[in-house]
Image (tube, grey):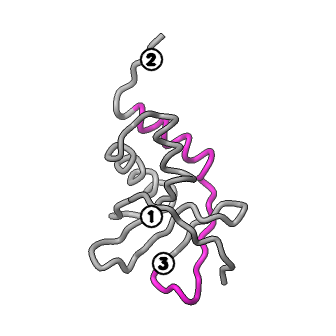
Amino acid sequence: MDIQVNKHQLERVVIKWLNIYYGDLTTKTYLNIPGKVFYVDKRGITVLEYEKDNEYEPTVWVDSDILWSKITDIFHINYNEIQSILEVWLKETYNLEGITPSQTRLALNFGFE
């Protein structure tokens, strides 16, 4: 059986999923890395990196293994759709406005201060 959903419905479903699994990330900063805020899960693993001092525009780097690929695998949506949904979610959940989410592999799981 195929279930048909429109773009807005899909966006709300993905955002609900994001809030369940990633809606309680904690912000951390590292003294040697100014201009960046790391969003970590309960295990201390970096899921998002907010680079507010990017020379082009503020960017949120989303870990491709931890989050981005899961969205792709579960919801079967493309890069641009994920990017658009993440923009809405980051604004609603973490008050990050006017940013561009992009995927990368984040290896920053070290001691924060």
Instruction: Name which of mark 3 and mark 2 comes first in the sequence.
Output: 2
Name the residue furthest right: 43
Kindly state the secondary structure of the residue where label 2 is placed.
loop
Q: Tell me the CA gap for discs 1 and 2.
A: 32 Å
Residue beneath the point at 38% across and 68% down: 59
> Closer to the camera, 79 or 4?
79
Query: Disc 3 residue type?
Result: Lys
Residue beneath the point at 46% across and 70% down: 50
Instruction: Name which of mark 1 and mark 2 comes first in the sequence.
Output: 2
Residue beneath the point at 58% across and 79% down: 29
Whether label 1 touches label 2, CB < 8 Å: no
> Closer to the camera, 111 or 23?
111
Whether label 3 touches label 2, CB < 8 Å: no
User: Residue 109: x, y in percent?
Assistant: 64, 71
Q: Nearer the viewer, mark 1 or mark 2?
A: 1
Residue beneath the point at 47% across and 59% down: 62
Which numbered disc covers residue 36? Answer: 3
Q: Tell me the CA gap for discs 1 and 3.
A: 10 Å
Name the residue furthest top: 1
User: Residue 99: x, y in percent?
Assistant: 35, 64
Which numbered disc covers residue 3? Answer: 2
Instruction: Name which of mark 1 and mark 3 comes first in the sequence.
Output: 3
Which numbered disc covers residue 61? Answer: 1
Answer with left or right where residue 64 lies relative to residue 5: right
Which numbered disc covers residue 101? Answer: none
Answer with left or right where residue 4 lies relative to residue 62: left
User: Residue 108: x, y in percent?
Assistant: 58, 72
Q: Which residues are magenta?
A: 9-35
Q: Quadrant of residue 102?
A: bottom left
The vertical placement of 33 against 88, above or below, is: below
For residue 27: magenta? yes
Query: Disc 2 residue type?
Result: Ile
